[in-house]
Image: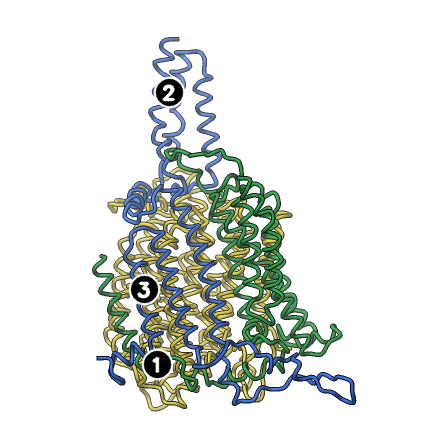
Amino acid sequence: MKRAAFILVLLIGLLLAWAAKDFPTWGDPHAPASSSPVSSHFISNTGVDTEVPNMVTAVLADYRGFDTMFETVVVFIAGLAVISILRGGPTRRTRDREFVVDFEPDLIVTNTVRLIVPVIQIFAFYVLAHGHVSPGGGFQGGVAMGASFILIALSWDLKTALTRFPIERCFTVAAVGIVIYAGIGLLSMALGGEFLDYAHLAKVLPVSPEMARYHAMLGVEIGVGFTVSAIMFALYASLSTDGRMQDGL
Amino acid sequence: MVEDGSIFSQLLVDRLNYFIYIILLLIGLWAMIAKNNLIKKLIGMSIFQTAIILFYVSIGVKEGATIPIYLPEHDPHGSHLKVDVNGSEKMLPPEVLESSLVPGYSNPLPHVLMLTAIVVGVATLGLALSVCLRIYRGYGTVEEDELLEKLEREDARNTGRPRRRRPRRAPSEKAVATEKLKSGNPRPRQSRTNRKGAKAGSSEGTRNDSTKSVTEKRKTVRKPRKKTSPKPKEDNS
Amino acid sequence: MSDHIVWIVLFPLMGAVACALSGALSKKLCYPISVISMIASVWASVHTMMQAIESPVHEISYILGGWSLDLFPRGVGIEFRADLLGALITLVVTGVGLIVTLYSKVPVQRETPGKEPMYYGLFLLQICGLAGIALTGDAFNLYVLIEVAALTGYGLIALGSNRAAAATFNYVILGTIGASLYLLGVGYLYLKTGTLNMVGIREVIEAQSLYDSPAMQVAFVLVLVGILIKMAFFPFHAWLPNAYCHAPSTTSCLLAPLVTKVMIYVMIRMVLTVFGVEFSFESTLWTEVMPWLVAVAIVCAAVMALAQREIKRMLAYLIVAEVGYMVGGVWIYNYYGLIGSIFHVISDACMTLCLFLGAGIILEKCRTTHFDGLRGLFAKMPLTMIGFFIGGFSIIGLPPTCGFFSKWYLITGGMVSERWEYMVTLMFSTMVMVVLFFRLIERIHLAVDESGKNLGKGHGDLGLTEEQTRFDEAPLTMLVPLLIAASIVMIIGVYNQEVVDQIEVFLRAYNLPTGVSYK
């Protein structure tokens, strides 16, 4: 079986290598992808259309915002599915011995974490908000925020973290994130534009259409940040405790 | 062998990025197919998806170009747009970037696509790990060959054939009558039927036998033995 | 307002979020919320279908984010395109979704108690993903929506039981390989053409004449092999029987009719719209090779279905055979073959829905779907059995059910292209399906056991007690959707010309050989 798989994989590799000689060379500025009208439009018109210096955030949240909405939905689906798969399953098999280790949270670790976690969370907010100007955005900031919750769970125990962020609240926050994202899109539709056409939000906000896009992108990134941070922690809590949410690492 | 224009130079020098990603892709694909441990398969899946991400990101590279964020001199809110009009400052609106400056910035589109692909990959990995955990809880193993053996035994045991439930669960009237005559105290028998009755009621919701874990099924197999055990006790009393 | 096309996808999304949020309040709210959002989605897709039929170019184009510019008539972002094919498939997806949502009240409560909010959330998001796949006009957005549909599918199957979780793992591995190969293929396409819009890619292929480029050929192989894995084409079908057999019954009622058929739609979309007829059929070797692979696939699937003793596994292997029909219909490179393939997608969705709904009702009332447990069911549940057998007759291909007409077009296509291997295997598998279903009819009506011995004492006597043959129909919320699905199978069959007219309007835009000098 392993040998057959190896031969199959080698054949696939040869097929891909045969195609590779037709590719443009690495870094060629006249390659079809690099010189295409669509990407040239993104590079030259992002400043004029959205007044956002970071082209990647502008393309992610504005030009291709629909994709990003479904990406957020994918994260939400992962959280829903993990909870529903792990909850209500069989309990641990009685043949396995449970090694319950009784320990106190370590003094140095807990005090260091107590100092660091607020800094991490402020940094996460910074990454989210500054995603317009530097690399960053909703996903990156959301993951950093979720990591701060996981750090609390690791350095004390999961119970301490769960008293602060219960799983039900995590799912509510995640759903609120998607509501924010879709809500901004629906608001644009209600104001007469297409779905996720932020320029029409200038009718309710006292700014120009370009700045309306700027602010709507921030709103959308905030929605994404909510969902990602909540689901990261929910995934960790479910997986580390088999869905029982009792003890943990 | 590595002169310009030969096949090796074409693959390994001009198009090195594509060659590297092909190697990583094959490693990941082989791990997904050939490895026995389920967790190793998932690691292979992660390597496979990472190779595809590297491929896309390398599409967007332009030689000598900077990252796709406007430099300060092209910034839409930059100081280069401030104009001194009669002593007071006025901000001009941002302007379209000249097409000669466009090759100075990397292509932003592959970065965007790969942000999405990374998140989708993480979500798939999380879901697959929870499925692995459920398999471990139910079957006690994450090795594929042991798992297949256990699944075959389970499938052979539950072909889904309908079982004749009543004769096995409740004792026949004749047995109950005999017990009553012998002991005059029907309670032990009743409690056992109650337990069985209650158990049958609670598992009403999951009548499909395959939902029971292996330990529960072993308990049902042990039931006939339990029925015969009180008889010696009854004789002693 | 022509934005009904977005509402098709938004209603299930909002319904799913509402279900997940309402789980905190009451678990009983999920069913009404799902039904309401599915009714709204069906209304939006009917409206979109009407608009697509009436529009002069027979398609509706909706640029998301409002980014249609003079330089980019198809938008610089993501486009939602509903041409006649996409609108038909979306109507089928939302219609089947509504019927299964109506059906789902009793089984979900019984099989997965306490998990309703999450179940309905995943359910509605699955329909949202499938409808989005049928509507999108952007290759990368298609990948994201395929993953939405796939992840919700994994969740819906694995939450059933341990055996279901073990079956899901194989599905996860194979499904991820398929989706990642598709993504790699899209990467190659982007590398060579510079655009992600489906129509835009074809325009660049035609403008730059990329027909013989090795990268494009390999991109074609990667994209199509990825889709073939996801649609369970033999020999990549290993995940399907286990996954659909051990899944909760509502999940298999939703996934079995829809997922593989939507992937066939994706294949047709890639072949016709993205790569174009000239590239796919004339510049590659697929037209020569695929009908032989299809013939092997159909024969193997039909024979394996014969060997099964349990209804759901037999139906799962029948799905693999039907996928073979549809893939063959595309690759015989023929006008009638493509009509047959597209019409078979629609009719197969409806008839598989009938069969799985019936199997779910049998599981609910008899606690088993094994052949031995089916004696005397016709006396017990006549309406259910009528619905189930209408689905069965449609799979065999008896008029006036829709299965007859789709097989007619497929066989016509095979004759026109002179693909005898495809036609012979089609006939052979039809005979096998006759045996399968009449064997079931015999068991259900006549109480025959394994060795063929009739257990009754005479005509009409089933050898069962009075209680076992008393009329005890399924609950109304399960029975009425089955009868609706059975009547849809008959209606599509009787009015098949209307559906085929729309398919012909769609296909006329592509230059396909018809084998006759007039169309």
**Which tint was used for chain C?**
yellow
Q: Chain of mark 1?
A: A
Q: Chain of mark 3?
A: C
Quadrant including the N terminus of chain A:
bottom left
Q: Which mark is residue B174?
A: 2
- Chain shown in green: A
Q: Residue at x 23, y 73 (%)?
A: C421
A248 to B198, vertically: above or below: below
Measure the C-alpha gap from mark 3 to mark 2.
53 Å
Q: Which residue is mark 1?
A: A23
Q: Which mark is residue C321?
A: 3
- Identify which residue, A24 or A107, lies in the foreground: A107
Q: Which mark is residue A42?
A: none
- Identify which residue, C1 or C138, lies in the foreground: C138
**Which tint was used for chain B?**
blue
- Give the structural element (helix, strand or loop) at label 1: loop
